[in-house]
Amino acid sequence: MKNAHYFAEQISENFSISKLLAILLVVTGHYFEGSLLWIPVSIGLFVFSFSSGYFSAERYHGRLNIRKFWSSKFRRLLPALFIVNIFLLLFFLWQEKAGIWHPHTIFAWFGLSGILDWFGIRNASPFGNGLWFLTVLLLFYVAYPLVNALCTNRNRAFIFIACFTVICLVGQLLAPQPYMLWLTVFGFGFGAFASRVNWRPSQLFACLSLIVIVSFFLMANFFGFKQFNILFIAAMSIATVAILLCVPMRESYIGPLAMWMPCVLEIYLLHTYVFVRLPELGNTLGYLLSMVLVLACAYTLSKLRHLLEENAAKHFR
């Protein structure tokens, strides 16, 4: 039992660290749009979705209290959304942005702007820029009670992931997006599956798998075979989370950056709005200044969120 508890704590720490590194990678990839960084960014988003699926399945299984589940997720996301949206509202008013009061703002304020994107509707609101992942996350939370019911045992979990893989492949073929939507969607289901089958890869297998897959991916692209890139990226994503499930990490590895581990959601929600792009600065200085602004704003808003949560807890105690 002690080993199992240690293992669970270690996995939690691994993903807490990796999610911070992943969101910083996403910020970097979004700043340098059009670069090859979209590949590690896609893997980073898979880490996020896998983590959500995995830990949801770890904490909520068996006879599920749906109301309690949704309530816990709502309480976790709402304060950050509220604080960041208020900050952005003031920011947009200062910039005199158009479309602040457009009906699309309602979608964005509740994290649903991805729905507009998927139906080909141009978002007329300054809110909701690139928040499709949040929409997928919310839809996963809505669908999780069904996922939980479908994966009640190991055999049913294998049937679920086989069917879910086919659904995601068909989705990629019939409804592709300019970003890795279906790989990210697959990550949620694969995370729940990995929890239910108690997937425990060995360190040697996980590390060798990633090395081999990356090697084949690079060779295939060197010789011009790019048709299977999405499958290679999916395989690299799975190998990456396999490593996170078995190779211990420590907060000390990321040094002072550890103070931003509680700020991942704020970084995600606001990062594209505070980018600095000035020709006189150039890309490098513009990126560094943007990262400083993102981290400073996210840290401040995270502290405000914690104050809001503490006051709410006292009020409703």
Image (cartoon, rainbow, N blue to C red):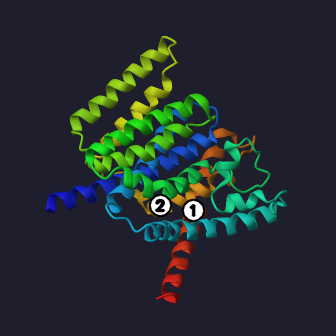
Using the image, tell me which numbered label, if any, was put on residue 71: none
| Separation of marks 1 and 2 at Cα, in angstroms | 8 Å
Residue 9 in the figure: left or right of residue 291: left
Q: Is residue 154 above or below residue 174?
A: below
In the image: residue 168, left or right of residue 283: left
From the image, which quarter does the N terminus lie in? Answer: bottom left
The foreground one among 193 and 206 is 193
- SS at mark 1? helix
| Residue at 57% in and 49% down | 133
Please give the name of the residue rendered at 52% of the width and 12% of the height, measured from the top-left corner.
224
* Residue 147 placement (x, y as % from top left): 41, 52
Tell me which corner region of the image, top left, top right, bottom left or bottom right, holds residue 112: bottom right
Q: Nearer the viewer, residue 279 or 169?
A: 169
Q: Judge whether 247 appears above or below 101 on screen.
A: above
Name the residue type under label 1.
Answer: Ala
Position of 51 with respect to 169 (left or right) is left
Q: Looking at the image, is mark 1 or mark 2 earlier in the sequence? A: 2
The residue shown at (66%, 45%) is 286
Q: Which residue is mark 1?
A: 298
- Label 1 neighbour load within 10 Å: few <14, some 14-19, many 20+: many
> Would you name the residue on which mark 2 appears?
260
- Residue 85 vs residue 288, the one in the foreground: 85
Residue at the far top: name it.
223
Whether residue 275 is visible here, answered yes or no, is: no
Residue 51 place in picture, x, y as percent: 40, 51
Three-letter code, disc 2: Trp
Q: Residues within 10 Å of mark 2 (few under 14, many from 20)?
A: some
Give coordinates of residue 208: x percent, y percent: 27, 29
Residue 288 visible in the snapshot: yes
Which of 25 and 255 lies nearest the eye of the viewer?
Answer: 25
Mark 2, secondary structure of its residue: helix
